Amino acid sequence: MTDRLPHEKGFHVSWDQIHRDSRALAWRLDGFGPDEGAWRAIVAITRGGMAPAMIVARELGIRTVDTISVKSYHAGGGKEDERREAEVLNSPDPELMGDGTGILIVDDLVDSGKTLELVRSRYPKAHFACVYAKPEGEKQADTFITGVSQDTWIFFPWDMALQYVEPYRGRD
Protein backbone atom coordinates (compact mmCIF):
# COMPACT_ATOMS: atom_id res chain seq x y z
CA MET A 1 0.00 0.00 0.00
CA THR A 2 1.31 3.44 -0.87
CA ASP A 3 0.86 6.51 1.29
CA ARG A 4 -1.23 9.22 -0.29
CA LEU A 5 -0.52 12.89 -0.07
CA PRO A 6 -3.35 14.90 1.56
CA HIS A 7 -4.51 16.28 -1.78
CA GLU A 8 -4.76 12.80 -3.29
CA LYS A 9 -7.80 11.97 -1.13
CA GLY A 10 -9.62 14.91 -2.58
CA PHE A 11 -13.25 15.89 -2.81
CA HIS A 12 -13.60 18.22 -5.78
CA VAL A 13 -16.51 20.65 -5.49
CA SER A 14 -17.69 22.43 -8.63
CA TRP A 15 -19.48 25.77 -8.72
CA ASP A 16 -22.66 23.89 -9.54
CA GLN A 17 -22.18 21.56 -6.55
CA ILE A 18 -21.49 24.36 -4.04
CA HIS A 19 -24.59 26.13 -5.34
CA ARG A 20 -26.78 23.03 -4.93
CA ASP A 21 -25.35 22.25 -1.48
CA SER A 22 -25.71 25.87 -0.32
CA ARG A 23 -29.34 25.88 -1.47
CA ALA A 24 -29.86 22.63 0.46
CA LEU A 25 -28.39 24.38 3.52
CA ALA A 26 -30.85 27.25 3.04
CA TRP A 27 -33.77 24.84 2.80
CA ARG A 28 -32.67 23.14 6.01
CA LEU A 29 -32.46 26.52 7.79
CA ASP A 30 -35.70 27.93 6.42
CA GLY A 31 -38.14 28.72 9.21
CA PHE A 32 -35.72 27.91 12.04
CA GLY A 33 -34.72 31.47 12.95
CA PRO A 34 -35.80 32.74 16.38
CA ASP A 35 -38.01 35.56 15.05
CA GLU A 36 -41.07 33.59 13.87
CA GLY A 37 -38.67 31.47 11.82
CA ALA A 38 -36.74 34.42 10.36
CA TRP A 39 -33.08 35.33 10.76
CA ARG A 40 -32.01 38.93 11.52
CA ALA A 41 -28.82 38.71 9.46
CA ILE A 42 -26.28 36.41 7.90
CA VAL A 43 -22.59 36.68 8.70
CA ALA A 44 -20.15 34.91 6.38
CA ILE A 45 -16.85 33.66 7.75
CA THR A 46 -14.35 34.90 5.19
CA ARG A 47 -13.28 33.87 2.81
CA GLY A 48 -14.81 30.45 2.25
CA GLY A 49 -18.19 31.27 3.72
CA MET A 50 -18.87 34.17 1.37
CA ALA A 51 -20.27 32.21 -1.60
CA PRO A 52 -22.47 29.91 0.51
CA ALA A 53 -23.70 32.85 2.64
CA MET A 54 -24.66 34.80 -0.48
CA ILE A 55 -26.65 31.85 -1.80
CA VAL A 56 -28.35 31.22 1.57
CA ALA A 57 -29.18 34.93 1.88
CA ARG A 58 -30.77 34.92 -1.55
CA GLU A 59 -32.77 31.76 -0.91
CA LEU A 60 -34.06 32.96 2.46
CA GLY A 61 -34.64 36.58 1.43
CA ILE A 62 -32.19 37.97 3.99
CA ARG A 63 -30.90 41.43 3.04
CA THR A 64 -28.57 42.09 5.97
CA VAL A 65 -25.30 40.32 5.18
CA ASP A 66 -21.95 40.95 6.87
CA THR A 67 -18.61 39.19 7.31
CA ILE A 68 -16.24 38.16 10.05
CA SER A 69 -12.66 37.65 8.91
CA VAL A 70 -10.87 34.77 10.61
CA LYS A 71 -7.41 33.45 9.81
CA SER A 72 -6.59 29.99 11.09
CA TYR A 73 -3.84 28.70 8.84
CA HIS A 74 -1.35 29.86 6.29
CA ALA A 75 -1.57 28.11 2.95
CA GLY A 76 1.53 27.30 1.02
CA GLY A 77 2.30 23.71 1.85
CA GLY A 78 3.80 22.01 4.82
CA LYS A 79 2.27 20.16 7.71
CA GLU A 80 -1.50 20.78 7.59
CA ASP A 81 -0.69 23.93 5.60
CA GLU A 82 0.86 25.42 8.74
CA ARG A 83 -2.30 25.41 10.87
CA ARG A 84 -2.16 27.90 13.73
CA GLU A 85 -4.46 29.39 16.32
CA ALA A 86 -7.44 31.13 14.80
CA GLU A 87 -7.52 34.91 15.05
CA VAL A 88 -10.23 37.40 14.17
CA LEU A 89 -8.98 40.03 11.74
CA ASN A 90 -12.23 41.98 11.30
CA SER A 91 -15.63 41.77 13.01
CA PRO A 92 -19.15 42.85 12.09
CA ASP A 93 -20.90 45.77 13.77
CA PRO A 94 -21.25 44.97 17.51
CA GLU A 95 -24.70 46.59 17.60
CA LEU A 96 -25.91 44.22 14.87
CA MET A 97 -24.34 41.17 16.48
CA GLY A 98 -25.10 41.47 20.19
CA ASP A 99 -24.77 37.96 21.63
CA GLY A 100 -25.65 36.48 18.23
CA THR A 101 -29.38 35.99 18.77
CA GLY A 102 -31.07 35.75 15.38
CA ILE A 103 -27.76 35.73 13.51
CA LEU A 104 -26.94 32.97 11.06
CA ILE A 105 -23.18 32.45 10.72
CA VAL A 106 -22.18 30.57 7.56
CA ASP A 107 -18.92 28.92 6.49
CA ASP A 108 -18.01 26.56 3.69
CA LEU A 109 -16.34 23.94 5.89
CA VAL A 110 -15.79 23.11 9.53
CA ASP A 111 -12.53 21.16 9.77
CA SER A 112 -10.96 21.10 13.24
CA GLY A 113 -13.68 23.37 14.64
CA LYS A 114 -11.23 26.00 15.89
CA THR A 115 -12.61 28.80 13.70
CA LEU A 116 -16.21 28.18 14.71
CA GLU A 117 -15.18 27.77 18.34
CA LEU A 118 -13.54 31.21 18.28
CA VAL A 119 -16.52 32.88 16.58
CA ARG A 120 -18.97 31.09 18.90
CA SER A 121 -17.08 32.46 21.93
CA ARG A 122 -17.94 35.96 20.64
CA TYR A 123 -21.53 35.21 19.60
CA PRO A 124 -22.75 32.29 21.74
CA LYS A 125 -26.42 32.58 20.72
CA ALA A 126 -25.79 32.62 16.96
CA HIS A 127 -26.64 29.64 14.76
CA PHE A 128 -23.60 28.14 13.00
CA ALA A 129 -24.16 26.52 9.61
CA CYS A 130 -21.63 24.96 7.25
CA VAL A 131 -21.96 23.28 3.91
CA TYR A 132 -19.38 20.58 4.70
CA ALA A 133 -18.17 19.16 8.01
CA LYS A 134 -15.33 16.93 9.14
CA PRO A 135 -15.73 14.79 12.28
CA GLU A 136 -13.40 16.86 14.51
CA GLY A 137 -15.43 20.01 13.86
CA GLU A 138 -18.98 18.66 13.57
CA LYS A 139 -19.84 19.49 17.19
CA GLN A 140 -19.17 23.19 16.51
CA ALA A 141 -21.72 23.33 13.66
CA ASP A 142 -25.42 23.52 14.50
CA THR A 143 -26.33 22.61 10.92
CA PHE A 144 -24.38 21.16 8.00
CA ILE A 145 -25.19 19.35 4.76
CA THR A 146 -22.41 16.88 3.94
CA GLY A 147 -19.95 15.10 6.20
CA VAL A 148 -16.53 14.11 4.88
CA SER A 149 -13.71 12.16 6.52
CA GLN A 150 -11.08 14.06 8.47
CA ASP A 151 -8.34 13.10 6.01
CA THR A 152 -10.24 14.32 2.94
CA TRP A 153 -9.01 17.53 1.32
CA ILE A 154 -11.84 19.58 -0.17
CA PHE A 155 -11.00 21.43 -3.37
CA PHE A 156 -13.38 24.39 -3.65
CA PRO A 157 -14.03 25.97 -7.05
CA TRP A 158 -12.57 29.33 -6.00
CA ASP A 159 -9.24 27.57 -5.35
CA MET A 160 -9.10 25.71 -8.65
CA ALA A 161 -8.26 26.28 -12.29
CA LEU A 162 -9.06 24.05 -15.22
CA GLN A 163 -5.99 22.16 -16.41
CA TYR A 164 -4.86 18.79 -17.68
CA VAL A 165 -4.29 16.12 -15.02
CA GLU A 166 -2.03 13.12 -15.61
CA PRO A 167 -3.93 9.77 -15.36
CA TYR A 168 -3.25 7.74 -12.18
CA ARG A 169 -1.58 4.98 -14.18
CA GLY A 170 0.58 7.34 -16.18
CA ARG A 171 0.78 7.78 -19.91
CA ASP A 172 0.25 5.09 -22.54
Image (cartoon, rainbow, N blue to C red):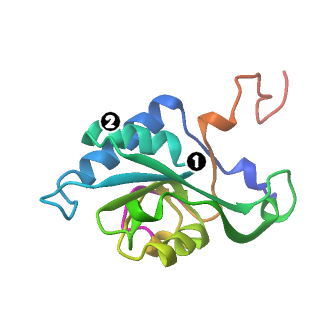
Relative to residue 54, is residue 111 drawn left or right? right
Q: Residue furthest front?
A: 95
Residue 166 lies, in percent from the top left, at 80, 28
State the mark number for residue 11: none
Residue 113 lies, in percent from the top left, at 56, 71
**What amino acid type should be assigned to the residue bearing mark 1?**
Gly
Q: Residues within 10 Å of mark 1 (few under 14, many from 20)?
A: some
Residue topped by disc 2: 58
Residue 163 lies, in percent from the top left, at 75, 22
Asked if the magenta segment contains residue 145, the reply would be yes
Examine the rendered structure and indicate whether residue 129 appears above or below residue 59: below
Relative to residue 143, is residue 170 drawn left or right? right
Relative to residue 21, is residue 38 drawn left or right? left
Examine the rendered structure and indicate whether residue 148 appears above or below residue 171: below
On-image quarter of the N terminus: bottom right
Relative to residue 162, is residue 50 drawn left or right? left
Quadrant of the rendered structure where residue 97 is?
bottom left
Q: Residue furthest left?
A: 36
**What amino acid type should be assigned to the residue bearing mark 2?**
Arg
| Residue drawn at the location 41% of the way across and 77% of the way down | 124
Secondary structure under tag 1 reads loop
Asked if the magenta segment contains residue 57, the reply would be no
Read off the magenta span: 141-148
| Residue drawn at the location 46% of the way across and 29% of the way down | 16
State the mark number for residue 48: 1
Q: Looking at the image, can residue 1 be seen?
A: no
Distance between mark 1 and mark 2 Cα atoms: 17 Å
Examine the rendered structure and indicate whether residue 28 appears above or below residue 55: below
Secondary structure under tag 2 reads helix
